[in-house]
Structures are given as structure tokens and as C-alpha cells.
Amino acid sequence: MLSRRTFATSTLAALFASSRIHAQEPEANYDEARVPAYTLPPILVGADRAAVRTKVAWRSRRAELLDLFGAHMYGRTPPGLPTATISEVDAPVAVLDGRAWRQQWRLEWEGRASVDVLVYRPRHDRQVPVFIGLNYFGNHAVDPDPAIRLSTRWMRTSEANGIVNHRATEASRGTVARRWPIDLVIARDCAVMTAYYGDLAPDDPAVVRQGIAPLADGRQDRIPEAERWGAIGMWAWGLSQMRHAAGRMPGLDAGRSIVIGHSRLGKAALWAGVQDEGFAMVVSNDSGCGGAALSRRIYGETIGGITSSFPHWFCRTLSTYGGRESAMPVDQHQLLALVAPRVLHVASAIDDRWADPRGEFLATQAADEVWRLHGVNGLGVTEMPRVDKPVGAHVRYHIRTGGHDITRYDWEQYLETVTRELR
């Protein structure tokens, strides 16, 4: 574990409260002077070394980069996976003093896997933008409402969040409600769709196959074992399935869907958003290593640390780059560029050094050239902004006060981006 001397007590409390587990990396670098010199692989130069100067040429380059990230980082999504059916739908219930509908339904795949979905939408007939994201401790933890079904799935044990012997208890209700400000989202005429990430892939290598993993059996025989998807790939695929389902439900505008995630689920949101261009906007909140932060900076968490502590998240190939990040054929600025020309919002926190806020900004800034190629106003700045001063247009970035978390302030910025860019 990282030495307790590395972080202030308040920051540690925030990290543990967010269910984050640090990698076994006792000598993580937090000194900018020790960041090694590095050269980022180009975005707008193809495998044939030809410059990419047109939107048509970008489509070919985009396919190259997407393939590289599948082979070297997240694993390849198996072909021919089934589309989810909506197997159960509860009648909508009026909540928030009658301003919103709350609805619970279930997605199911071939009777072999399922995910319970919780939706809040404004109580009118118009279709609205919908935030689609996964949660850490079950839908019942998003709101204390006793009518929300208590998850019975495996969970990481957490006394603070009411998880005992890997199962949720009644004490778990509403424990992460502050991370899901439903009232704010409804007030801005948007909807929220969420599901427990463990429904798709339990977050432990010993039980990760209890989710949707069996759906890939027989469908990835031609994918080399080292390139097969891990939990992040499964969570990302589930997010895309949720988007497809949103298009079949009243009040939700799947054409203005926003995929959102915090921390490891920020990594999943990015991978979902770059694979599924049906998402109109992609939000990365404190996603760090393997998310929005540049791997080559060797600051905070690194490839070696993350693949050692969480071997089930990525494909096995990624672990071969631990300690040799410069040998990777890709880096995260290229991943962010794959969102273009859609809307991207990347967020950091000033005290979240483990996630390398500067590395997240530099990746965002480096990716901006692809929005310029498309003639779209992107980030538009070259210097990291001041704390709590968001910048950008179709590419937005903010760094806020505080540590590793997703806060009401973060949601306010994402909703402002929706208002500016998706209306």
C-alpha cells in the first residue's frame, strides 16, 4: 500500500470512502521534476506514416487507433454478442415532489445474464438528454428510497457503505446519494440511468465471471487470449447496451445520451464512448491511469501498478508494458481523440495526485487537434486552467477543489456542458 505519509488524512478518507483501492506501488512519483522525458505517439499520422488531413482520412486512422487500444489495453469486444431485451418494467412512480418519474427495469441477455436499471426522468412528455453511468454499490445506494430493490449481487465488502460479507444490507441504502444529485439533474431537464457495475462484472478476479462474461464463451475463440476483454471492457459494453435500451423507453433521448463514469468507471465510460459513437457526449471524472491520464508521464499510478493490483480490468497484454510505458504503441491522448467530433468533458481534482490531474489535462489538450480537424471548437487553451474555472467548448476540462470523488460541483459542470453543446 502507499505510505500514509504520502497523503493528508482528509485525502485518505476521501479515497477510501470512494471504494478506491491503491495499487502496490510504494514509490509512486509525485514530483514533476522526476517525470521522465517522453514523446507522445502521433494522433494524425497513420500507420503508413501519412499525415491525416481530412475527415475521411481520420475515419481510417480512427479505426487503426481503436484496434490498437483493443489489442494492447482494454481487450477486444467479442463479436456477435446478443442485444439485451427489456424483460421487466415497473410502473413509473412520481418522486421529488412530483417533479420526476422513477422507474426500475431489467435488461436480460438470453436468460443467462441480467442487469437491474434505475431511471429518473422529468415528469413530462418531452424526450430529454440522459446520463448513463454505472454505480459502485447497487441502485439502492443511489437514493435512500426503500422502494428501490436491494441488490443481491456480490459486492466489495465495505463497512462504510453497508456491505457485509460481500452482500448489501439495508444500511447500504442511500450511502452514495451525494454522488448522484438527482434533484439537480431533473432541475436541468435531464434524466439519469444507472446500474450496479457488478451486475455486469463483479470487481474481483475470483468472481469476475459471475456477470456477463459467459456470454462471450465461444464468441472469442479467434481472439488471442492476451487480447481478450477484461472487466473494463465488460462494463463498457454494458453501458452501450443501456444506451440501446434507452431508445426503447419513453422520455429518454438516446440521441442525446451522455456516458459518464468516475475513477475505474471513468475508464469504462471512455472505452464505451469511443467504441459506441451513438453516445453524444463522453464524461471522464478522475479516471486516471488507463483512463484520461497520460501513461508516459510516470506520475501517480502507473501501468505496472494498476495491472498488478487489478489484473482483471484490462487485457493481459497491458501488463507487459509495466515499467516500459514508452514501448506502448498508444497513449491516452489518442483515446480521448476517438471521441471527436462529439462532446468530451474531462475532469480532475487538485488533491487527487494518484490520478495525475496534469496528465489528464495534457492528454485532453493533445487530443484537441482532432476537433480542430473537424472544424469544431474544442478545448481552445494550451495552459492548465485555474482550479474551479472550467474551460473549453465541445471539449471541456475542469479541475476542482478537493480529492478523488464525483461531486455536485462536477455534475453542475457536466449539466452546463449539456446545455451549451447538446441543446
Image (cartoon, rainbow, N blue to C red):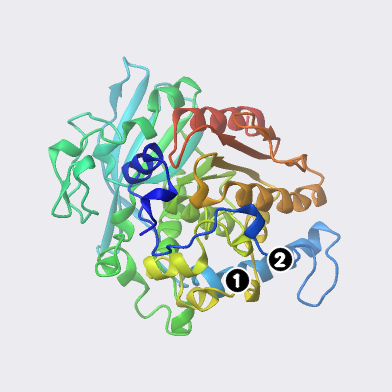
Q: Is residue 46 left or right of residue 345?
A: right
Mark toward the start of the polypeptide (1 vs 2): 2
Residue 355, position as x, y percentages in the image: 51, 51
Q: Is residue 69 left or right of residue 127?
A: right
Quadrant of residue 186 in the image? top left
Residue drawn at (38%, 55%), measured in percent from left and top? 3
- Is residue 33 positioned above or below 413 on the image? below
Disc 2: which residue: 38
Residue drawn at (45%, 45%), measured in percent from left and top? 262
Residue 331, position as x, y percentages in the image: 64, 64
Quadrant of residue 380 in the image? top right
Instruction: Find the residue positioned furthest to the front.
Output: 5
**10 Å neighbourhood of mark 2: few (<14), some, or many (≥20)?**
few
- Is residue 113 positioned above or below 405 on the image? below
Q: Secondary structure at mark 1?
A: helix
Which amino acid is tagged 2? Tyr
**Of residues 56 and 49, the one drawn nearer to the viewer in this rendering:** 49
The C terminus sits in image quarter: top right
Query: Marks 1 and 2, Cα distance to the nearest angstrom?
Result: 10 Å
Disc 1: which residue: 325
- Is residue 242 positioned above or below 314 on the image? above
Which amino acid is tagged 1? Glu
Q: Secondary structure at mark 2?
A: loop
Do the CB atoms of the residues marked 1 and 2 lie less than 8 Å apart?
Answer: yes
